[in-house]
Image (cartoon, coloured by chain):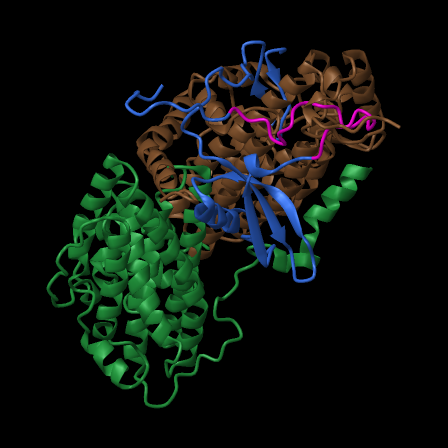
Amino acid sequence: MSAPTLDRSATGSPDEATLQEQFDATIAADRRIEPRDWMPEGYRKTLVRQVAQHAHSEIIGMQPEGDWLLAAPSLRRKAVLLAKVQDEAGHGLYLYSAAETLGADRADLTDKLIEGRQKYSSIFNYPTPAYADVGVIGWLVDGAAICNQVPLCRSSYGPYARAMIRVCKEESFHQRQGYELLMTMMRGTDEQRAMVQDAVDRWWWPSLMMFGPPDDESPNTAQSMAWGIKRHTNDELRQRFVDMTVPQAQALGVTLPDPDLAWDADSGHWRFGAIDWEEFRRVLAGDGPKNAERIARRRAARDDNAWVVEAATAYARKHERGAA
Amino acid sequence: MSEVTAEGGHGAIPTGPEVPVQPRARAVQRDWPLYEVFVRGKRGLNHVHVGSLHAPDDEMAIDAARDLYTRRNEGVSIWVVRAVDITASSPDEKDPLFAPSGDKVYRHPTFYEIPDGVPHI
Amino acid sequence: MHEETVYDALTNAHGEAGHWAFGTGFDDPLAGVDTTVPDGIDPADLGAYCLMLGDDALVLAQRLTQWITRAPELEEEVAIGNIALDLLGQARLLLARAGSVGVLGRSREQATATIPDEDALAYFRDVDEFRSTALVAAPDADFAQAVVRLVAASTVRLAVFTRLRSSRDPVLAAIAAKGVHELAYHRDHAARWVLRLGDGTEESHRRARSAVEAVWPLLADLFTATDVEERLAAAGVAVDPAAVRDEVRDVLTQVLERATLPVPAWPAGAPPRGRLGEHGPELAELLGILQGLARQHPAATW
């Protein structure tokens, strides 16, 4: 008979090698790692970075479309867009929560975003000059995001996987509203059809770039896949997106701006032209005016309202349960 | 291209060794407390943990939970509880998935008590 | 593959369409509703009254939407989004009701025939045809003004909608019945914020106090009935705004007192202005942004 445990914190810890073994076995069995489990420091750091930057992308991603909220051309479109942008705030929030289970802190992560020490997806540094951009963002950008995100519903880290399930359910509404807007515009005036084609021309290549560098230039992929944080390579997901999107473009009646796009019957895939990674690097460098504008808006939301956050904290202290 | 990654939902995020992921040594005083949210999806079901949020106090936490976790009619009743008020089962080395890492469910930098009169640091 | 199954399940979620905030295709907010005007009600008056209530909701939704991406915390972004969506929903129903009784004004001459009534009214009326009050049109200088205005506007609207549930116009009564639940939440959420700002820090108290001073004068013309409201109130269709004044004053006074804020003198009643189409430049500016794109493409469908 063993002695009773009187002090829970005093139970001994297994050594690190055993813990690593248990961690590896959990991953190998495709089971989930949960917040209180031991995890290698590299796994934790990679996850915090990934989840935080994903959260930042959701929050910054509110802005390109949010700029159209006040000017949406019908009340129904305004309601749909508002619900969508609101969802993105929710997605950011779910994801920050997942990062917090890893020991991060939301206000601290927001500071890092504002100080440029953590990044967000470069796709949100492209401008949105026309209302058709709202539709194309839904169709292509959210479509690409869904391709990236659905596998993350099986991420090895439980809180991230659960957040992604919620996010993915809501994202499918986002993609559908975008595609539906484009269909409606294509049935409208010549001017509207031209707006849609122009937006497709501007967003097609950036959408493909969203999947990241080609596999042979993507050194982080192997470790992330071994950890079950990433489920497919960049090129696999990019190909899946192209295969899914080409028939949708045909149904819509728009031309994708790639003369090399061709059906390859042997492989059963659409082949596409070479991606101009130089252009990608320029946007990625983040020196464009949109990057500064996006961060400035986020900074203003934090700084201009700091007094509100402090006020609520002060009120809570004064009216704490049990306080006089 | 090693300076970029497609990790995370929207891909193509610049990364690199310079991206800091450790929480700051000093805690951020601005943060409202973390709440855990439990929703009863429909009558006859248990409340289930659905996620968390930050709120200044219990009342505002309920408002935020309603707006955030039931805006598509996902629930008929909401519980919120401060994360720090949750007591978790003891870590048990006999369960390989229960490695000890502290007795708090959510490992957050907590507020440091700062005396009145000290400017925000 | 597993993901494809998940993906298919997500993209073909039609079976649970009710789970989503919005379906596809244009949905007439009054689809399936009998829009016949009961005997003894003047359709022109009814339409004008629906414009008053609808325009208030539309303009306030637009003001709240300006906070999106600029709110104090992410939780509050979501809360403001919900409130704006509720109000936008009320505006769509009320404008559609106005359209259904033939009150389209000049908008029908400017909008093409394919544009739904709600959009013809929202996008193709000129500023002097809007019937909203100054309370909803005023810009917010800061978050304190946003929540003080919201508590005032939703308290008034809740008092009116509560009574409208027994309106002789069944459509208006149904819109009101749906709206009271939404408005009660808007009022309570805003009131909770007023409490926290008023009784928070020195700075928040000062800002809340300035907000009250800025918002209270805008209550002056809210409780004076127009001729339309008088006639419809007598017919059991509308609410005479004078009838809700004391209730509104009591609620707002209670909120300010709980928030440790000084209660300003109740403004003396003034003749209606916004309800008759007299507006300041801030409404023209707001409508310029709201209507700009739709008016650039009058023949377009969205």
* Residue B85 drawn in magenta: no
Q: Is residue B99 magenta?
A: yes
Q: Position of residue A68 (x, y in %)?
A: 41, 42
Q: How many marks?
A: 0
Q: Colour of chain A?
A: brown
* Residue A74 in the image: above or below residue C4: below
Residue C285 against residue A272 in the figure, above or below: below
Residue C283 percent coordinates (x, y): 23, 52
Indicate the position of residue C8 as horizontal and vertical percent values. Answer: 74, 46
Task: Work out which residue is located at the far bottom of the displayed protein and give it.
Answer: C39
The hue in which chain B appears in the rendered picture of the protein? blue
Q: Nearer the viewer, residue A25 or C137?
A: A25
Determine the main secondary structure of the stretch shown in magenta.
loop
- For the N terminus of chain C, the image quarter is top right
Side of A291 where C197 appears, left or right? left
Quarter-wise, where is residue A143 in the image? top right
Give the residue at the far right of this rendering: A1
Give coordinates of residue C109: x percent, y percent: 31, 65
Q: Residue at x 37, y 72 (%)?
A: C162
The stretch in magenta equals: B89-109
Note whether C99 is above or below A171 in the view shown: below
Q: Is residue C288 visible?
A: no
Horizontal side of residue B88 vs B119, given as left or right: right
- Give residue A116's quadrant in the image: top left
Who's the residue at 43% across and 16% down the image? A287
Is residue A213 visible in the rendered image? The answer is: yes
Tell me: residue C14, above or below residue A290.
below
Q: Residue at x 74, y 22 (%)?
A: A11
The green chain is C
